[in-house]
Image (cartoon, coloured by chain):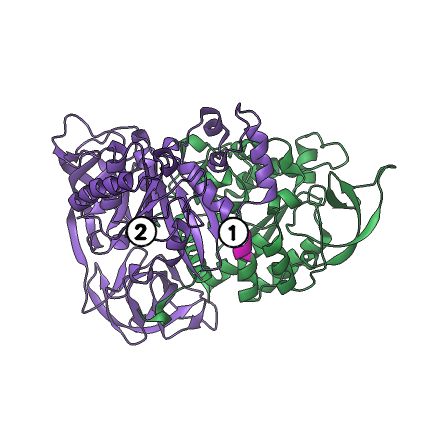
Chain colours: A green, B purple
Amino acid sequence: MNNSHHLNYLEQLESESIHIFREVAAQFEKPALLFSGGKDSITLVHLARKAFAPGRIPFPLVHIDTGHNFPEALDFRDAMASQLGATLVVRKVQDTIRQRSLTEPKGKFPSRNWLQTYTLLDTIEEFGFDCCIGGARRDEEKARAKERIFSVRDEFGQWNPKLQRPELWNIYNGKIHKGENVRVFPISNWTELDIWNYIRKENIDLPSIYFAHERKVIQHEGQLVAISEFVQPDEQDLVMTKKVRYRTVGDMTCTAAVESTAETLEEVINEIVATRISERGETRIDDKVTEAAMEDRKKNGYF
Amino acid sequence: MDLLRFITAGSVDDGKSTLIGRLLYDSKNILIDQLEALEKSTKNRTDGSVDLALLTDGLRAEREQGITIDVAYRYFSTPKRKFIIADAPGHVQYTRNMITGASNASLIIILIDARQGVVEQTRRHSIIASLLRIKHVVVAVNKMDLVEFSQDVFNDIVIDYNQVAAQLGLKNITYIPMSALDGDNIVDKSERIAWYTGKPLLDFLEEVQLDDDVNLTDARFQVQFVIRPQTEELHDYRGYAGKVISGIYKKGDKVTVLPQGIDSTIASVEIAGEETGEVFAPQSAVLQLADDIDISRGDTIVKSDNRPQVSNELEVLLCWMDDKPLLTGNKYLLQHNSRVVRAIVKQVEYKIDVNTLQQQPVEGNVKLNEVVKATLKTAAPLVYDSYEKLSEYGSAILVDETSNSTVAAVLIK
C-alpha cells in the first residue's frame, strides 16, 4: 500500500476525536464543553477547533470554578477563550456552597473536588445543557476504563455502570429523555503520553505551571504540596523551596507537584516517559481515600 | 508508530486477565503505584501471590464477584505500536459485551486452556470473530506449563481448531503456545517451549501487517454535520464535515450525492480548515461541492463510478442486546453511522446457534444475546454496502424509541 495513505496513531486518535465532536454538535441541542484549564481540556478545545474549522466551536466552554484553582490556569483560560472568540461560562462552587448551605470540607487539604458535582448539576439545569463534553481518559483510572464515550446520566447526573448502552463500531447513540444528560469523552482512547506527544506535534500552548519553576512546598505523605492561600503549613511542616512542575492541574488543595528540572516540552515528555508512577498516583491527593473512590464519585454525578 | 485495536476472548478460567496483566507487566506498562494497589487487593487473598488478573477488574462489583461484567479498555504501547485492548467477558450471557468489544477490533486473541482444548466457548468466540469479520486471529494455547509443554498437545489443538476455522471461513490464524502465569511466550520467547519456532505474542502483535485493513478503493463519505460559518468573509461557505469511511477523495472528483442521486464535483477537500488536495480513510475531513445542492446529515457522497447499494428493504443479521425481547413487526430507529431512519422488523427467518453456527427455527420472541437473520423495511432508503464488503459501511444499530436503548447490532447482508 501507498505509505502516503497511512495514518499514524496520533492522526488516528485525532480523527476519532473530531468525529465524536461532530456527532455531539449534530445530535444535541445544547452541548457544552467542560473546560478546566488543564492540558486535557486544552487539547479538547484544540480538537474542537479543528473539527469545526473554518467555523467557530458551536458550543460554550463551561468552567466549574472551585475557587481553589491555580491563578496561572485561570489566566490561561481567559486568554484562550477570548482568542477563540468562544463563549465562556464560569460558575463558582463558592456560590453553590452559599446558596445551598453546603458544608465546606475541612482539614489541611480541604478539597472541594466532589462539591463541584453540585455546581455542575445546577449549571446543567440553569442552561438546559443536554450534553457535557469532558476530557476524561480511560487510562486514568479503573472505573473510567469501563465508561462509554457517550455516557448517559440520569436526571441526578448519576452513572449506572450496569446499565450502559452497548457502543458498537463508531456509532454513537445520544438519544435521551428530557432531564437526562450525556457526558461525552472524545479523548477516551488517549493516554497521558498520547496527549503530551500531540501537544508537541501540534504546538499547543499550556499554562506555565506544567513546566519546572520554583515554588514553596511542604511534604505530605511523600507528595509535594504547594503553599497557597488554601494550604497553610503546620508547625511540624518543613517549608522548602523546590523546583517543581505539575503533571496535572486540578485544585491547589488536592494536586501535588513533581520535583523536576524540565523547562521545555521535550524535557517534560522525557521525564514522563521515564517515570514509573501513574499520573493520578503521583499528583492526586484525593484518589487515595478508597480503592473505589472514582467509581463512587461517578455514580453520584461526578465527571 | 501505528495503532492496533484487539480484543481478548476467554474467561478468567482460561487465564485471560492474567494474560493481559502479563502483557502490561512484562512490557513495563504497569506503574509502581498501580502495582502497590494490586498488592493491597491481593492481601485479602489467602495464597499471598500478586494476582495479575486483578489489574483488569475495574468495578468494585466485579472485584467482589471475581468476574468481568463489562468491556474494559486497556492501553499500552511499545516503541513500535500503540495498543488498545478491549477486554471482554467470555461467558455466554455476556455475548453482547463481546460483540461490542469486537466491533472495533482488527485482531482477536482467542484463549484456549491447553488442558481443555477446543471447547464450546472457543467455538462461540470464533463464531463471533467470523460474524464480525475480524481480520486477524491469534489462538493463544495457554497453561502449557500444566501439560508439561507438550508439543503433541499443542499440535492436537491446532488440528482441532483448524477444523473449526475452516467451517467458519476464518483466515490469518496464528497459534502460540504459552503460559501467561509464568510469562512464557508473552513478551519473551520461552526456553521451556523450545520446539516452538514462531514469535512470542508481543512480537507478533507488534509486527502483524495492518496496512491492508483500510479499504482505499470504494470511496464512501457520510455527512455528519454541515459547517456554515455565515461570517462576512465566509458568507457562502458550506462545508460537509464527516469521516472518510473508505477510499480517497480529491479535488475535482466527479461525485454523486445519495440517496438523492444528484451529481456534482468536489470543489475542495479540507482538514481543520486547510485545503489538502486529497483526503483518505479514516481521516475526518470537510468536502465542498461545486454545486449548490440540498445536502444534510446522513447523506452520502460517493464517486460517481463506484456506487453502494440503495434500498429500503434490507437482509440483516441482528445481534439482540436488550433485556426486552425483539417483537416482529415492531418499529425501531436504525442508526447507520450518521443516518437515522425508522425501520420495521418484517420477518425473522432463523436463529444462529452461537455455539454451533447451526440455523434453528425461532420459537417465540428473540431474546438477549441471540443472533438472528431478519428482514428490515426502512421508512426511507438506506445507502450501504454489505458488511462483508465494507464492514464500516455495512454496520448499524437499532434503537428502541421508547427507552432510547441500543437494542441490536445490525450486520447488513
Query: In the rendered structure, the residue with mark 2 lies on which chain?
Result: B
Task: Tell me, yes or no, if residue B326 can be seen here.
Answer: yes
Q: Would residue B266 be counted in the magenta stretch?
A: no
Q: Would residue A193 be counted in the magenta stretch?
A: yes
Q: Secondary structure at mark 1?
A: loop
Q: Residue at 70% across / 29% down in the picture?
A: A103
In the visual, does A73 lie left or right of A142?
Answer: right
Q: Which mark is residue B198?
A: none
Q: Secondary structure at mark 2?
A: loop
Quarter of the picture containing the C terminus of chain A is top right
Q: Is residue B312 above or below residue B98?
A: below
* Residue tagged 1: A191
Q: Residues within 10 Å of mark 2 (few under 14, many from 20)?
A: many
Towards the viewer: A256 or B11: B11
* Residue tagged 2: B337
Q: Residue at 47% across / 35% down in the picture?
A: B53
Three-letter code, disc 2: Asn
Percent of width and height locating residue B205: 38, 53
Q: Which residues are magenta?
A: A190-195
Q: Residue furthest right?
A: A235
Q: Magenta region, mostly helix, strand or loop?
A: helix
Quarter of the picture containing the N terminus of chain A is bottom left
Towards the viewer: A151 or B136: B136
Task: Tell me, yes or no, if residue A138 can be seen here.
Answer: no
Are the residues at dot 1 and dot 2 in contact (C-beta closer than 8 Å)?
no
Query: In the rendered structure, the residue with mark 1 lies on which chain?
Result: A
Percent of width and height locating residue A138: 49, 45
The mark closer to the camera, 1 or 2, is 1
Q: CA distance from mark 1 to mark 2?
A: 26 Å
Percent of width and height locating residue A197: 54, 61
Three-letter code, disc 1: Thr
Percent of width and height locating residue B201: 39, 49
